[in-house]
Image (cartoon, grey):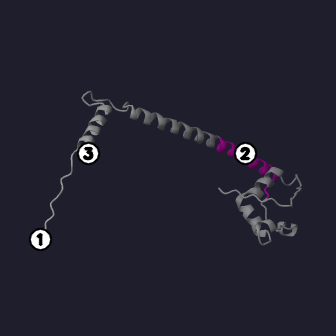
Amino acid sequence: MKKRLILCDKAYRIRCDESRVDKEFLELVLNAPHMVNKIDELKTGINDSGLNLTQDRFFTLMIPVPAVDQQRRLVEQIHAQVQCIEEQELAIELSLKQAAAQRKNILKAAFAGQLVPQDPKDEPASALLERIRAAKMEHAGKAKPVGKRGRKA
């Protein structure tokens, strides 16, 4: 996910009537992707550094506001879900590390010939490699026959 960071000379402070709106709820709602998109649509200007969001435009934003007790329950549920997601991310990271280690162990065992039972009749790899080298040397030592060219007299 591409993170957007714009340093600007403006900061917005929102004060809310806490008897009607929970601060954490409002923060979560305003940072929700669909609300960020709506806020972006309300901004004016030609580029990121020159964007402007006036109070008048901001106040046109429709924010769903359930009862305060529901807001607080939603905030608790969101925090619980975020905690579950963070725990799952940690579990995934651990699993990926374990999988990488297991892959190394499997490759090591494969190269050591420990994955399947070995046939005692099989020659060792070193003997096979030596035979291949000898065959290459023998082949390189033989001169290639030169073909006769047919000429017309």
Q: Which mark is on residue 152?
A: 1
- Split into 4 quadrants, where in the image is the C terminus? bottom left
Residue at image location 11% in from the left, 71% down from the top: 152
Residue at image location 13% in from the left, 68% down from the top: 151
Q: Amino acid at mark 2?
A: His
Q: Are marks 2 and 3 in contact (CB under 8 Å)?
A: no
Residue at image location 62% in from the left, 42% down from the top: 88
Q: Which mark is on residue 140?
A: 3
Q: Is 124 displayed left or right of 152 in the figure? A: right
Q: Specify the segment rendered in magenta.
A: 65-86
Q: Secondary structure at mark 2?
A: helix
Q: CA distance from mark 1 to mark 3?
A: 34 Å
Residue at image location 26% in from the left, 27% down from the top: 120
Q: Position of residue 117 (x, y in %)?
A: 32, 29
Confirm whether the magenta stretch covers residue 9: no
Q: Earlier in the sequence, mark 2 or mark 1?
A: 2
Q: Amino acid at mark 1?
A: Lys
Q: Position of residue 61 (x, y in %)?
A: 80, 66
User: Which of the two discs, 1 and 3, sits closer to the camera?
Assistant: 1
Q: What residue is disc 2 on?
A: 79
